[in-house]
Amino acid sequence: MRPSGRALDQIRPVSFTRGFTAHAEGSVLVCFGDTKVICNATIEEGVPRFLKGKGQGWVTAEYGMLPRATHTRNRREASSGKQGGRTVEIQRLIGRSLRAAVDLKALGERTITVDCDVIQADGGTRTASISGASVALAEALNALVRDGKLAANPMRGHVAAVSVGIYQQTPICDLEYVEDSAADTDMNVVMLEDGRMIEVQGTAEAEPFTPDELNAMLALASKGIDDIVVAQKSALAE
Amino acid sequence: MRPSGRALDQIRPVSFTRGFTAHAEGSVLVCFGDTKVICNATIEEGVPRFLKGKGQGWVTAEYGMLPRATHTRNRREASSGKQGGRTVEIQRLIGRSLRAAVDLKALGERTITVDCDVIQADGGTRTASISGASVALAEALNALVRDGKLAANPMRGHVAAVSVGIYQQTPICDLEYVEDSAADTDMNVVMLEDGRMIEVQGTAEAEPFTPDELNAMLALASKGIDDIVVAQKSALAE
Amino acid sequence: MRPSGRALDQIRPVSFTRGFTAHAEGSVLVCFGDTKVICNATIEEGVPRFLKGKGQGWVTAEYGMLPRATHTRNRREASSGKQGGRTVEIQRLIGRSLRAAVDLKALGERTITVDCDVIQADGGTRTASISGASVALAEALNALVRDGKLAANPMRGHVAAVSVGIYQQTPICDLEYVEDSAADTDMNVVMLEDGRMIEVQGTAEAEPFTPDELNAMLALASKGIDDIVVAQKSALAE
Amino acid sequence: MRPSGRALDQIRPVSFTRGFTAHAEGSVLVCFGDTKVICNATIEEGVPRFLKGKGQGWVTAEYGMLPRATHTRNRREASSGKQGGRTVEIQRLIGRSLRAAVDLKALGERTITVDCDVIQADGGTRTASISGASVALAEALNALVRDGKLAANPMRGHVAAVSVGIYQQTPICDLEYVEDSAADTDMNVVMLEDGRMIEVQGTAEAEPFTPDELNAMLALASKGIDDIVVAQKSALAE
Amino acid sequence: MRPSGRALDQIRPVSFTRGFTAHAEGSVLVCFGDTKVICNATIEEGVPRFLKGKGQGWVTAEYGMLPRATHTRNRREASSGKQGGRTVEIQRLIGRSLRAAVDLKALGERTITVDCDVIQADGGTRTASISGASVALAEALNALVRDGKLAANPMRGHVAAVSVGIYQQTPICDLEYVEDSAADTDMNVVMLEDGRMIEVQGTAEAEPFTPDELNAMLALASKGIDDIVVAQKSALAE
Amino acid sequence: MRPSGRALDQIRPVSFTRGFTAHAEGSVLVCFGDTKVICNATIEEGVPRFLKGKGQGWVTAEYGMLPRATHTRNRREASSGKQGGRTVEIQRLIGRSLRAAVDLKALGERTITVDCDVIQADGGTRTASISGASVALAEALNALVRDGKLAANPMRGHVAAVSVGIYQQTPICDLEYVEDSAADTDMNVVMLEDGRMIEVQGTAEAEPFTPDELNAMLALASKGIDDIVVAQKSALAE
C-alpha cells in the first residue's frame, strides 16, 4: 500500500557517514532514504551570555536547506534577510532534543553548535537532522575525551527521531515526501535510546486523531527509533 | 502539593470576556488565572497569494506579548526588528490549531487573522491564546452568518488547549508559572470539543518521560479541555 | 455641533486605572473616551551607554498599537520588521515629555521605560499615552521612595497632554477620531501641571492656521489639561 | 550676546544655489550659514498605492546626512540597516510641510520626491531642508509648466522654516549649533509666505516655556521667515 | 617549494560529479582538491522585472558557505540577517561570468539560477564555483534541448576559472588555503574555453605587482584553465 | 570618435577641491568631468575588534550615492534597509586600495574611515572615489603629523584609479556614462604612483577580451593614472 512498497513499520535505508567534511569536530552525512543532511558539530570555548558563570555548557543547533534541496527552488534565507518560521521551529526542536541528551554540567563552559544543512529533501528532514546531529555530537564529545579535556562523554545515550503518521487511515512509520504531503496526521517523535521520550509533536493536518491512533503511532515510532539507534551505534563503532 | 492548592486535575478559573475591544469582528479577553490574553479576530476579503483561485479561505494567527507582561521587561519585538523564535513557534501553533477546526472551503475566499496579545503572563499563554482565539473566531464567523455572507458557521466545533506536565514526579494540569518553570516535562494539548486531538507537543525539559506518563498527561488534558469547552460555550451563549 | 454633543472646550470622560497589570512597577489603563492605552513603567538599574558615569538617570518610552486597535487591521510591526515612522515619532514625543518632568540627577543611575500600548484607538492616542504614562511613572517613582531607594519623588509635577484642533472653522478640545479625521489643523500640547509648556506640535492638515487660531487652541488646551491633571491627582490619591 | 555677534532676530546669511546637480528636475544647494543641504526634487508619473485612482498627486521627502556632516562621524544609516528615529521624524515633517503648500488635485497623478541630504551641519538642518526643498519643488513644478504638462504651478506660495529658541533666558532666531546645544527651548516654525502657519514644533529641552515666551518666539520666527522668503523669491527670479 | 609539492603551474586534482542531487535541472559537485562546492542550476520560466518584454533570458547565481566549511565556524548568514560583503561580491562575479558565456536572446524568456554552496573550503571557492556552475548550467541547458524547448544549447563554450598569485615572490597557479593566506597578490581569472578573458580580478594583498608579474600570472591561468576545461568536457561527455 | 571628442588616451578634466566640508580631518570634492564625489576621511582612535592588540591601524571606506545622483532616482539605501550588492562591492574595493597604500603598523592603533558619497554620477564613480579618497586620506594623515601624533606620513605614495574599456572595438581611457553603457569591456585599474598595480578588475560586459586587448587597456590606464597623480600632487601642494 505504501508507494515504496515498504511495510507499515519499516523505516527507509538509514546511513550515517562520519568524517563527511574535514574541519568540524564532528561531521556526519545522514541519509534517510533520499533525504540527505550534513550535520557538523562545532566546539567553542565559552557559553552564551545568559549562562555565564553558571558552571555549565550549552548545546544548540541551526538548520538550513540548500535552495534546491526540494522539487522547486526556495528563496535562499540569507538573501531574503531572515529565517522562515518553519526553519526557526525546526532548529529549536533539534537544539532541545540534543540538550535533553547531554549532562550540561559535565560538559563544562563550552558551547557545541550543530549545523544541520539539508542538501536533498524527501520528507523527514527534521528527524534525519536530529538523528544525524546526535552522531556528530557524539563524535565531537569523544574528541574532547580523547584530547583529555573531558574525563567521560557527557551524553546520556543516543537520541534518535522518526516521523509517524496516519496515511490512508493507516498508521505508518518514517514518511517520505509523497506520503507526508497526503497524510492526515503527522507526528515527530524524539527518544533517548532507552525508549523514554524527549519530544512528541503531533499535528492533525487534515483530520483530528484519537488517543488510540496516537498510541498506535507511538508504538511505530518506538520500533523505528530502535532501528535507527542500531545504525547510530554501528556508525560510531567503526 | 501545588503552590496554589489546586487539585492535580484542576484548571485555573477560566473566563472569556466577549466584545473586549470595539473594532474587531471578534474580540475576547481570555483569562486562565493570572494569564490574560486579548484575542481579536479580523475578517478580510481575499486570500494569500498561494491560495488564489483555489476556492477556499484561510485562517491564520499572530502572537505577541506586551514588553512588561512578564516579571522582567522583554525587549519589544517591533523595536528589535524581528519576532523571536518562541513567538514564531507559538503563532504557527495557534494558526494550525484554528485551521483544523474550520471548513476552509465553506469559509469562501476570506482570510481571518486572529491576533493574540498577552497583556499579563503567568504560564500557559499559548493554551489560553488558542482557547480564546477559538471564541473570537466563532464570534467573527457568527457575524458573517448574521450578515448573510455565510449560510452556516463553518467551524467543526470548539478548539481548546491546555498545558499538562510532570511536576515533582506527578502529572498535573494547567501549569502556572511557578509550576511550569520547575516542571520536568511540559506538554501542550489541543483538542476539538469531541475529544479528538489536533496538536500534541510534549517536551522533556529536564527528564525524559515514559509512555505511561504520556498517557497520564493526556488523560488530564482531556478532562481540563472539557472544562474549558464548557466555559467557551457558556461565553458564546450569552 | 460636535458629533458627541460635547461643548467646544469639553474633554471626553477620562479615567486612570492603577495596578492594571501585575508585574510592572507602575501600571495604568488610561481611557480618554473610547481610546484606551495600557501604560507600564519598568525600573531598571543602570543607564544607557551614552550616560554612563554622568551621575544621572534616564526616562524613555516605547509606543505600540495592537494590530486591531483601529477600524481596520494594521500590519503588526514586529512582523513587518520595523516600527513605522508614526510610531517612532510618537514614542520620541512621549519620552521627551516625561523627561521634562523628572529631575534626572535626583533619579540616580536608573532607567525607567514606560511602554504605552494602545488596545483601542479613537483619536488622541498620543495625548492619552503621555497622560497615562505620567501616572504610571509617578507610581513607579513612589515605589522607589517607599522602598527607601529614593529620598523623594523626583517628578517636578504631573505631565498631561491633550489634542486641540480647528474643526469646521472652530477650535475644539480633545478630538475623537471622527473629528480628527476631518480637522483642518491638529495640535498636540503637553504641559506641566503649573501650566508651562513642554511640547507644542501643531500641523495644518488641510488649511494653514493663523496666530489667533493658535492662541485660541492653546487656551483650550490649557483648560483641558487642567481637567486631566485633576483626574491624575485623584487617581494617585486613591 | 550671541556667539556670532548676530542680533537676536537676525538670521544667518542664507543662499539658494539652483541647478546644483545635473539630473534632478529641481536641484538646490541651500546654505543657512555653515549648514549646507542638497535638495533634489524628482518627478515621477503615478502615485503610491493608497492614492491610486483618487485623481490627485503626492509630494513626499526623504532626509539624510553624510556620515561626516557633523563634528564626529555618525554611523551610515544604509549600513546600519535602518533610518534612525530623528531621521524619520525630520523627513515626515519636511513632507507634511511641502504637501501643505501644494494643490495636490491640480498636480495630477504624479509623485514628487524631494531628497534633502545634509553635507555639512551647524544647527537648523531641518529648517534649511524645508526652505531649500520649497525652492527645488518650485523649480520642478515650473519645469512641468514649461513642458506643457501643467497649466499652472500648483504651489500656494513659498514655504519656509526657521528655528527659534530660548537661549540664556532670551528668545533668539535661527540657532546655530553652539546656541542650539545650550538652549532651554527649541522650536521649529514652518509658514507659508502669507504668514500662516503650517507646522509649529516646540520642545522644552531644559526648562518648560510660558505662553508669553511662545509668542515672543513666534514673532521672531515670523520675521525670520519673511527674510528667507525674500531670498527664495530672489533665487527663483534669476 | 609549494606545501603540496605541486609544480608551479600545476592545478589540484579537479573533478565534476554530475547528478549530485536529485531535484535540480543541473547538479554538480565540483572538487578542486579539498575545496568542494555543490552547484545546482534551476530553470524557471519568466524573467526578472527589469527584463520583462525584452525577448531575452537571464542567468544569475547565488553563493553560500556552510557555517563549518572552514577551519572555524562562521556565523550563518540566514541567521545574521544578511549576506556579507564577500558573499555578495562572489555571487555577482559568478553571475557575470556565466552570463558572458550564454546567448541570452537564444535562451528565451527563462531565468536560470545557479546556487553554489561550499561544503568544504580550502582556497579557490569562487573559481571552483564558476567552473562547477558552468557544468551545471550546461547540464540544465542540455535538458532544455532534450525536452524540445530549445533548438540548440545557447552556451558559447565552457567557462572556467582559476586563481593565480605571487607566493614567495613566485607566480603559482590554483592556490590552496595555506598558499592563499600567505600570498602577496591574489588574482582570479575567468576565461571562455577559447582562451578569451571574461573577468580578471587581481588584488595586491601585501605587495603591489608589476605588469610583468601580471603577465606571468595570466600565462599560468591560461594553462590551468585549459586543464579545467578538459575535465569539464570529460564530465559532460559521460 | 568619442562622444566628447576626447583623444583615446585622454582623461576628463580632473579636480580635487580640498577642505570641501568643515568637520572631517580630510575632506575633498573630486570631479572627473561631470562625476562628482565628496570624500571625507575620519580619524578615530582604536581599531576594530579583529585587530585589537596587534599593534597596527586600519583603513576602511564606505560608499554611497545620493538618490538623484543619476538620471533617474534610485531608492535610498538607508530606507530600503540595506546596501545593494554594487555598493558593497565598490566600498570593499576602495578600502582594499587605500590599505595597500598605507603602512598600517606605522599608523598605530587608529582607524581611518573614508566616506565616498557621489553627488553626481557620469561614469567612473569608483575610480573617482579611490582617487579622491587618496587625497582625503593624505590630508588626514598630514594632520596627524602636524599634530605630532605621527612622526611621518605612513602612505607609500598616492593611489589613483581610472577606468579603461573597449568601446567600438577600440581601447579608450576614463569612460563617461555614454561610453560605459555601450562598452564591450570595462576595466578598473588601481595603481600606486610608482606604476605598480594594486587592483585590476576587468569585466567582459558583451564580448570577451584577448590578452592583447588587456595589455592595450593597461597601457592606457598607466598613462591616465600618471595624469591623475599629477593633479593629486598639485592639490596637496596648495
Image (cartoon, coloured by chain):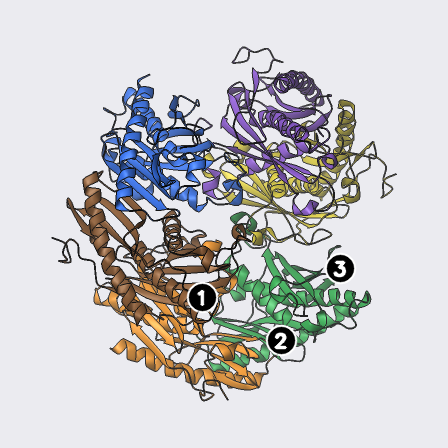
Chain colours: A yellow, B purple, C blue, D brown, E green, F orange
The residue under label 2 is which amino acid type?
Answer: Met
**Residue E88 in picture, x, y percent from top left:** 54, 61
Disc 2 crowd, CA 10 A, few/some/many (<14, 14-19, 20+): many
Q: Of marks 2 and 3, which one's residue comes earlier in the chain?
A: 3
Pointer 2 indicates a residue of which chain? E
Residue shown at the point (30%, 72%) measured from the top left: D238
* E210 to C24, vertically: above or below: below
Q: Nearer the viewer, mark 3 or mark 1?
A: 1
Query: Which residue in the protein does label 1 denote?
Result: D151
The residue under label 1 is which amino acid type?
Answer: Ala
The residue positioned farthest toward the front in the image shown = C1
Disc 1 crowd, CA 10 A, few/some/many (<14, 14-19, 20+): few
Q: Are marks 1 and 2 on the same chain?
A: no
Nearest the viewer among A208 and C88 is C88
Helix, strand or loop under label 3: loop
The count of marks equals 3
Helix, strand or loop under label 2: strand
Pointer 1 indicates a residue of which chain? D
Query: Which residue in the protein does label 3 denote?
Result: E19
Q: Report the quarter where the N terminus of chain C lies.
A: top left
Residue shown at the point (49%, 69%) measured from the top left: E183
Pointer 3 indicates a residue of which chain? E
**Residue A185 in picture, x, y percent from top left:** 75, 33
Query: Which residue in the protein does label 2 denote?
Result: E191
User: Is A12 positioned to the left or the right of E125 in the image?
Assistant: right
**Residue D42 in picture, x, y percent from top left:** 44, 64
Cα–Cα span, label 3 and label 1: 65 Å
Q: Report the quarter where the C terminus of chain C lies.
A: top left
* F228 to D4, vertically: above or below: below
Residue D84 at least partly seen: yes
User: Is B42 positioned to the left or the right of F105 in the image?
Assistant: right
User: Is E109 positioned to the left or the right of F222 in the image?
Assistant: right
